[in-house]
Image (cartoon, rainbow, N blue to C red):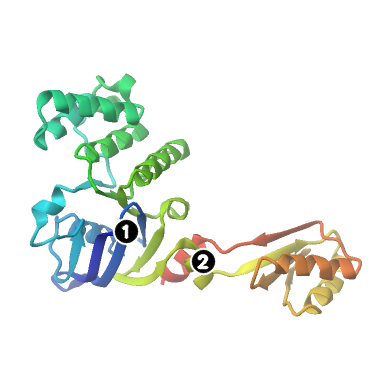
């Protein structure tokens, strides 16, 4: 499906003399995840605040679910959910009562609110803790409750602003699986994160922000190809083999660099791994270890966002 659910065009935001966003444009299709990467202060949260109608843009325009975030802010708010960097639940209420309260505020009747709360508690594996005050929940449980709260109104678009900050690996994995299920069911997600593995796993497209500007955008694979470099790494058994291995690999048009017993060779394609293996074999050499290293989002982030 190609329906655009998030569409920001040349969005600017200034706070006095401070430029928080400078001509930012992003899009996200229905049922997809748009990942926003960038350092603290890059403009990620400011963009989320504009798209969720909490801040007006200084310039440019933005639509969510087809509605203008300024002129049709009520229509936007009725179609979105938001989970911020810190759990926003009422710690003095039980998990169940938190969800019922939100459902009632959104206009649900009493019975409907209780049904919706029970359904979400089951979906997020919180049924056993439903009657406990939220202040007794672990960090992972609070984040799941917070995400459940953002889904009470069945939003078409979900904004997740660093949703797994501070969570242990198991809790992060559980959150990823929940997000993947939501997207499979048609929800559109905008995800801001500083966890590169999170963006790599969840995002269909990624926009990298730096100092309020878009410095790169594309799929994970496209960004890796843009700034990353594949390498073949060969580890030898003996220092006496290093010079011969360098000559052998140079002989097939590649350019290895030696560091002790390890040779690192930049390559253009994964098939070059076989080229290196054949070059060594043709010269009577055998690697102790050999492998292909693909570029990562770490390379993208360090090359682009850190500038």
Front position in the image: 4 or 298: 4
In the shown orientation, is residue 267 left or right of residue 140?
A: right
**Pointer 2: residues within 10 angstroms few (<14), some, or many (20+)?**
many
Q: Quadrant of residue 21?
A: bottom left
User: Measured from the top left, where is residue 124 in percent x and y?
Assistant: 34, 31
Residue drawn 15% across the image and 33% down it: 103
Q: Does the image show residue 152?
A: yes
Residue drawn 16% across the image and 28% down it: 113
Q: Quadrant of residue 176?
A: top left
Relative vertical location of residue 159 with respect to residue 97 in this rendering, above or below: below
In the shown orientation, is residue 72 left or right of residue 97?
A: left
Residue sitting farthest toward the right: 284
Total tally of numbered discs in the picture? 2
Q: In which quarter of the image is residue 205?
A: bottom left
- Work out which quarter of the rendered image holds the N terminus and state it: bottom left
User: Measured from the top left, where is residue 267 in percent x and y?
Assistant: 66, 72
The answer to whether the residues at label 2 and label 1 have Cβ atoms under 8 Å apart is no
Location of mark 1 (residue): 29
- Work out which quarter of the rendered image holds the C terminus and state it: bottom left
Under circle 1, the secondary element is strand
Which mark is drawn over residue 287? none
- In three-dimensional space, the C-alpha distance between marks 2 and 1, rounded to whole angstroms, equals 22 Å
Q: Does the image show residue 95?
A: no
Question: Who comes first in sequence, dot 2 or dot 1?
Answer: 1
Location of mark 2 (residue): 224
């Amino acid at each position: 499906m190609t329906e655009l659910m998030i569409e920001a065009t040349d969005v600017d935001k200034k706070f006095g003399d401070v430029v928080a966003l400078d001509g930012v444009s992003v899009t996200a299709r229905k049922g997809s995840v748009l990942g926003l990467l960038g350092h603290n202060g890059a403009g990620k949260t400011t963009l989320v605040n504009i798209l969720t109608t909490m801040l007006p843009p200084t310039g440019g325009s933005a639509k969510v679910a087809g509605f203008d975030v300024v002129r049709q802010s009520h229509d936007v708010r009725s179609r979105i959910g938001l989970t911020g960097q810190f759990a926003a639940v009422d710690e003095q209420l039980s998990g169940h009562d938190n969800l019922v309260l939100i459902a009632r505020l959104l206009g649900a009747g009493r019975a409907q609110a209780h049904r919706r709360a029970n359904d979400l508690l089951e979906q997020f594996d919180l049924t056993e803790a439903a009657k406990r005050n939220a202040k007794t929940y672990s960090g992972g449980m609070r984040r799941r409750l917070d995400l459940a709260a953002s889904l009470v109104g069945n939003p078409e678009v979900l904004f997740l602003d660093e949703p797994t900050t501070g969570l242990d690996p198991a809790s992060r994995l559980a959150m990823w699986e929940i997000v993947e299920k939501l997207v499979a069911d048609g929800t559109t997600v905008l995800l801001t994160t500083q966890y590169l593995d999170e963006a790599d796993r969840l995002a269909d497209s990624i926009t990298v922000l730096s100092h309020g500007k878009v410095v790169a955008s594309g799929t994970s694979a496209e960004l890796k190809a843009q700034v990353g470099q594949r390498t073949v790494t060969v580890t030898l058994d003996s220092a006496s083999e290093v010079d011969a291995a360098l000559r052998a690999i140079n002989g097939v048009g590649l350019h290895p660099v030696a560091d002790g017993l390890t040779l690192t060779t930049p390559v253009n394609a994964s098939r070059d791994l076989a080229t290196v293996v054949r070059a060594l074999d043709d010269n009577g050499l055998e690697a102790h270890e050999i492998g292909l290293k693909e570029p990562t989002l770490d390379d993208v982030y360090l090359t682009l966002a850190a500038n």
